[in-house]
Amino acid sequence: MRLSQFGAIHSLLYTDRADVYRTEPIFDPITGSTNNAERDTPVIKDLMCRLSYGRPDYATKNPNPVEPVEAAGRLFCAAGVDIKAGDKIVTRRTDGGVAYAVVTMYAGEPQRYPSHTEIELRESGVA
């Protein structure tokens, strides 16, 4: 049995859309070098995917409102997608073409399978 055949079945679950950005140094044509500034360059637009994520309930564990928060997630998408560790992924969950949730996270090392790709995601912020 070829597992790559299950990719079409997985794609039925891809109800979210994502844009993938890769941070690259900015090249200065005048000096001929790259400076310390970086920019997010779009790599993929409107990637069909499925985001699974959760946010731990820090309010009950720590009453300090400026405590750093780590939310974790996992992105599921088609096999062979060009996503690398460190890429910024902006995922939109929509209903009838209207986005009701937008989540920005950063990719860990992708786990590639014959049928799909899974990417561990992290989001840093302040509670």
Image: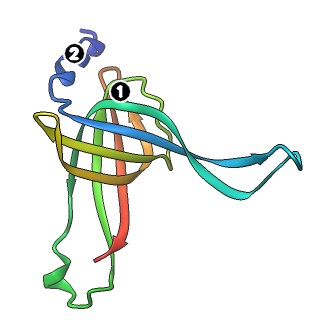
The x and y percentages for residue 26 are 70, 49
User: Which residue position is annotated with label 2?
Assistant: 8
Quarter of the image for the C terminus: give it.
bottom left
Name the mark on residue 75.
Answer: none
Around disc 2, counting alpha carbons within 10 Å, would you say few (fewer than 14), some (14 to 19), or many (20 or more)?
few
Please determine whether, in this image, residue 23 is positioned above or below residue 113. below
Q: What amino acid type should be assigned to the residue bearing mark 1?
A: Tyr
Quarter of the image for the N terminus: give it.
top left
Given the current orientation, which residue lies at the most extreme left position? 96
Q: Secondary structure at mark 1?
A: loop
Q: What amino acid type should be assigned to the residue bearing mark 2?
A: Ala
How many numbered badges does the structure rendering display? 2
Q: Is residue 91 left or right of residue 19?
A: left
In which quarter of the view is residue 51 placed? Answer: top left
Given the current orientation, which residue lies at the most extreme bottom position? 64
User: Mark 1 or mark 2: which is in front?
Assistant: 2
Residue shown at the point (20%, 90%) measured from the top left: 63
The x and y percentages for residue 82 are 48, 30
Q: Is residue 23 left or right of residue 87?
A: right
Name the mark on residue 113.
Answer: 1
Camera-nearest residue between 16 and 106: 16
In which quarter of the view is residue 96 placed? Answer: top left
Q: Is residue 20 left or right of residue 101?
A: right
Please determine whether, in this image, residue 9 is positioned above or below residue 108. above
Residue shown at the point (43%, 49%) measured from the top left: 108
Q: Is residue 109 left or right of residue 98?
A: right
| Mark 1 or mark 2: whose residue is earlier in sequence | 2
Q: Secondary structure at mark 2?
A: helix
The x and y percentages for residue 20 are 43, 40
